């Protein structure tokens, strides 16, 4: 074959091995180039930001923990109240029945056998009611002779009562009741008041005249 024979253009290898090696070396050097070290001020700023984020996260964790504790206490308190006062409406419904029994017993006068049997039956029923009330911590408020307490007593009237100290309960029209320390119904009472002092403008009567 003749050495002067031309090689087709599509068979000419245009790739230069030396150029390829230089380009690869340049890319490797670029990838291995180390970023400049941060300055002291930059490090301080990064540290301050990291501490700020840490404090914010800590505050969030503390608040979340506090909210969980508060929710736990509220739930516990609600459950306790639910157990304590589940019978509140039922107990209120029983109070008029107790009132009727006591009023009927007070009105039952006479010594006939029928009246005696009625009184005995009413007293037994009242004792059974009192036993049930005590079992469920329903406490009677019967403040006769005690100082008036606006939180537990409802004053129906005030008047002078001989022998009674002012601002004390002189009569109980209707007993009150409490359930586990919560007022179911106030006691309706008559409150004694002090004697009115004579007016300074009242005329002076000369008994010797």
Image (tube, rainbow, N blue to C red):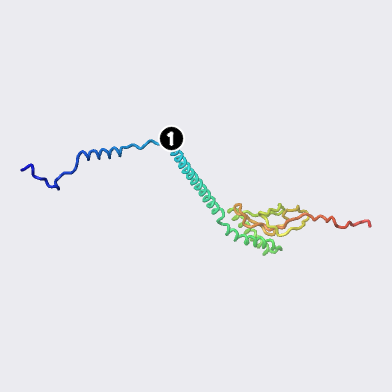
Picture coordinates of residue 172 (x, y %)? 70, 57
In-image side of 70 versus 188 (left or right)? left
Which is more toward the observer, 187 or 31? 31
Image: 43 above or below 60: above
Picture coordinates of residue 26 (x, y %)? 27, 38
Picture coordinates of residue 71 (x, y %)? 51, 49
Which is more toward the observer, 10 or 178? 10
In-image side of 26 versus 159 (left or right)? left
All told, the count of numbered labels is: 1
Q: Quadrant of the C terminus?
A: bottom right
Image: 193 above or below 30: below
How packed mark 1 is, by other alpha carbons closer than 10 Å (few <14, some 14-19, many 20 or more), is few
Picture coordinates of residue 121 (x, y %)? 64, 61
Which is more toward the observer, 30 or 142? 30
- Which secondary structure lies at badge 1? helix
Image: 35 above or below 191: above
Q: Quadrant of the N terminus?
A: top left
In-image side of 58 versus 97 (left or right)? left
The residue wearing badge 1 is 40
Which is more toward the observer, 73 or 9? 9
């Amino acid at each position: 074959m003749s050495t002067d024979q031309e090689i087709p253009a599509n068979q000419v290898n245009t790739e230069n091995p030396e150029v390829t090696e230089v380009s690869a070396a340049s890319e490797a050097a670029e990838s291995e180039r180390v970023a400049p070290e941060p300055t002291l001020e930059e490090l301080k700023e990064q540290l301050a930001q990291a501490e700020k984020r840490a404090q914010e996260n800590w505050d969030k964790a503390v608040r979340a923990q506090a909210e969980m504790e508060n929710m736990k206490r509220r739930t516990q308190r609600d459950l306790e109240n639910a157990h304590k006062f589940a019978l509140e409406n039922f107990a209120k419904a029983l109070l008029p029945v107790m009132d009727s029994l006591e009023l009927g017993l007070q009105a039952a006068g006479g010594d006939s056998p029928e009246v005696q049997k009625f009184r005995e039956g009413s007293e037994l029923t009242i004792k059974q009611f009192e036993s049930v009330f005590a079992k469920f911590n329903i406490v009677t408020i019967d403040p006769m002779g005690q100082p008036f307490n606006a939180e537990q007593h409802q004053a129906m009237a005030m008047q002078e009562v001989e022998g009674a100290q002012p601002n004390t309960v002189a009569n109980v029209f209707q007993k009150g009741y409490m359930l586990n320390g919560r007022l179911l119904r106030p006691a309706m009472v008559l409150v004694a008041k002090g004697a009115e002092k004579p007016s300074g403008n009242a005329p002076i009567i000369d008994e010797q005249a």
